[in-house]
């Protein structure tokens, strides 16, 4: 079967466009680029469900390093808790984790008052402990509930939750440090 030059050129052009579109979709997904109405709808949902000061810390199922389910409210300490959302591929997360480990080592806060949460599977928790050299517990949000329902999409993210389970502080700037007096006030307020 013989095709004319124009038909072959048209087919090649269509193939190139198809490959470019597929590559763009792949890269857009990898880079988290959103387009169209889907992102607008998603942002609207997150606007209504974000975590912030005055909001009760949510009750969701996390996984511990022994692959056991743990409800998030069990992690909260009666004297207040610092919750660190960290990732194993995030240099500022390592700095934040080291800062809070130093505070634990210096006695500024108890180790049972600092908790890490990551979007990883339980098998990765041990590697995150080793990589960041921390003693405080880290839990996996394997189902991405904090991401999908509460809009936690940046690392690191620091929450301070008081003894009543209410969030008193939210910070995503890894350069901002809480002073001891301010931390104590937020844990108790």
Image (spheres, rainbow, N blue to C red):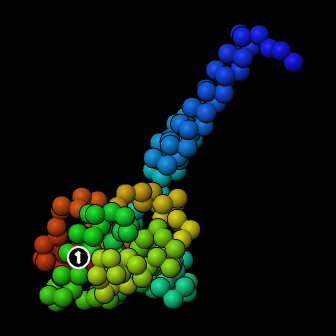
- Asked if residue 95 is positioned above or below residue 25 in the image, the reply reads below
Position of the N terminus, as image quadrant, is top right
Q: Is residue 140 left or right of residue 116?
A: right
Which residue is found at the position 18% from the left and 82% from the top? 103
Which residue is found at the position 44% from the left and 79% from the top? 125
Pick the residue in front: 150 or 26: 26
Residue bearing mark 1: 98
Position of the C terminus, as image quadrant, is bottom left
Q: Is residue 189 left or right of residue 154?
A: left
Instruction: Please say whether residue 168 is visible from this viewpoint.
Output: no
Q: Tag 1, which secondary structure?
A: helix
- Asked if residue 26 is positioned above or below residue 99 in the image, the reply reads above
Count of picture labels: 1
Q: Residues within 10 Å of mark 1 (few under 14, many from 20)?
A: some
Q: Position of residue 23 (x, y in %)?
A: 56, 38
Q: Position of residue 128 (x, y in %)?
A: 38, 76
- Asked if residue 136 is positioned above or below residue 146 in the image, the reply reads below
Instruction: Identify the residue at the far front of this view.
Output: 2
Pick the residue in front: 104 or 16: 16
Q: Position of residue 29 (x, y in %)?
A: 52, 46
Q: Is residue 116 left or right of residue 70?
A: left
Pick the residue in front: 116 or 151: 116
Instruction: Identify the residue at the far right of this view.
Output: 1
Which residue is found at the position 37% from the left and 57% from the top? 154
Q: Position of residue 144 (x, y in %)?
A: 52, 65
Tell me the quarter of the picture where residue 179 sits: bottom left
Which residue is found at the position 67% from the left and 15% from the top? 9
Instruction: Please say whether residue 154 is visible from this viewpoint.
Output: yes
């Amino acid at each position: 079967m013989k095709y004319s030059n124009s038909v072959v050129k048209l087919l090649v052009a269509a193939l190139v466009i198809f490959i470019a579109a597929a590559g763009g979709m792949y890269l857009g997904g990898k880079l988290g680029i959103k387009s169209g109405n889907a992102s607008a709808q998603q942002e609207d949902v997150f606007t209504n469900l974000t975590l912030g000061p005055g909001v009760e810390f949510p009750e969701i199922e996390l996984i511990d390093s022994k692959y056991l389910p743990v409800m998030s409210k069990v992690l909260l300490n009666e004297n207040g808790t610092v919750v660190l959302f960290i990732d194993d591929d995030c240099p500022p997360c390592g700095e934040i984790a080291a800062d809070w480990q130093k505070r634990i080592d210096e006695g500024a806060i108890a180790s049972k008052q600092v908790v890490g949460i990551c979007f990883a599977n339980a098998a990765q928790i041990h590697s995150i402990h080793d990589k960041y050299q921390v003693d405080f517990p880290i839990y996996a949000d394997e189902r991405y509930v904090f991401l999908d329902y509460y809009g936690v999409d940046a690392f690191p993210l620091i929450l301070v939750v008081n003894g009543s389970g209410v969030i008193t502080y939210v910070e995503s700037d890894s350069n901002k440090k809480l002073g001891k007096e301010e931390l104590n006030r937020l844990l108790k307020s």
